[in-house]
Amino acid sequence: MRLPWSITAASLERAAMLTITNLQVYYDRAVEALRDASFEVQAGQIVALLGSNGAGKSTVLKSISGVLYPEDGEILGGSIAYEGTSLAGLAPHEIVRRGIVQVPEGRRLFDKLTVEENLLMGGYSRPLGEINAALDQVFTLFPDVKQHRSRVSGYLSGGQQQMVAIGRALMSRPRLLLLDEPSLGLAPQIIAEIFGAIRRLRDEQKMTVLLVEQNAQLALSVADYGYIMERGRVVLDGEPSKLLSNEDVKEFYLGMGAGVDQRRSMRDVKHYKRRKRWLS
């Protein structure tokens, strides 16, 4: 059965669903979070955006979703185009209506509402006649959520809350799903279930996913393409096989470099970082 949030064949023919070009973002007009960040997201793919803490990954998602303002963030340069149309100046709810929905880091559920009430909040923009079908589709993707539909969400485990957060996003029929650190703080078994659901959204529904993750091995195991960010800009990109074979990626993101088993001083580490190919 084709779910209502699936992508049509016509949309898959477009070269890029999302194009970010030379994006510059500052906080308080003083702290540079992104500098000339550029990348593309092809329709129907899972694209991984990787990098360490502070690299700018979450800022990219907030820029796309139009939610920089709570932290005094501002786009001061560059562009974000969704299906060839600029997102500049659009309010967050307008961006959601265009089919872009973000699942933020930390889930951020309405913890005093039940699971079902949280899901219904995600589907507020849909016709009433579609709500029950949308709920059934979320419950099919996450059977564990259905079992707890009447529980107050604040009493759920972290993994269950993450499933509800993703389900809430799916209720609004996204065409581009933005996931911010979905594996953070979760047990391996729950992570496997959540990433299995992400694969299903791509494989069965042709949904486009922009996945922000610190766990590079995990992200690249499901991604069709990946970008690595350092210091607010994209420094390396390629298909997962290319990134997994890169020596610098192995060293700093996979823990597989030649020097991993040798003790090195912080000075040596900093020197190595400075000589990384993408920063030379």
Image: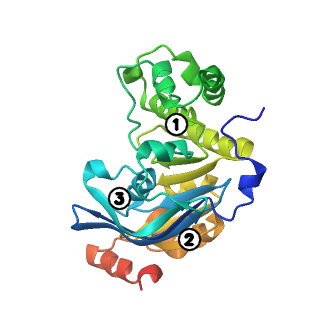
Q: Nearer the viewer, residue 91 or 245?
A: 91
Closer to the chain start, of discs 2 and 1, is 1
221 or 124: which is nearer to us?
A: 124
Q: Secondary structure at mark 3?
A: loop
Gap between marks 3 and 2 measured at Cα: 18 Å
Can you say which quadrant of the picture contains the N terminus? Answer: top right
Q: CA distance from mark 3 to mark 1?
A: 25 Å
- Residue that appears at 59% across and 67% down: 244
Q: CA distance from mark 2 to mark 1?
A: 27 Å
The C terminus sits in image quarter: bottom left
Q: Residue at x 75, y 59 (%)?
A: 13
At label 3, which amino acid type do we have?
Answer: Asn
Residue 53 is labelled as 3
Give coordinates of residue 229: x percent, y percent.
44, 67
Tags 2 and 1 in contact by the CB under 8 Å rule? no
Q: Which one is closest to the eye, mark 2 or mark 1?
A: 1
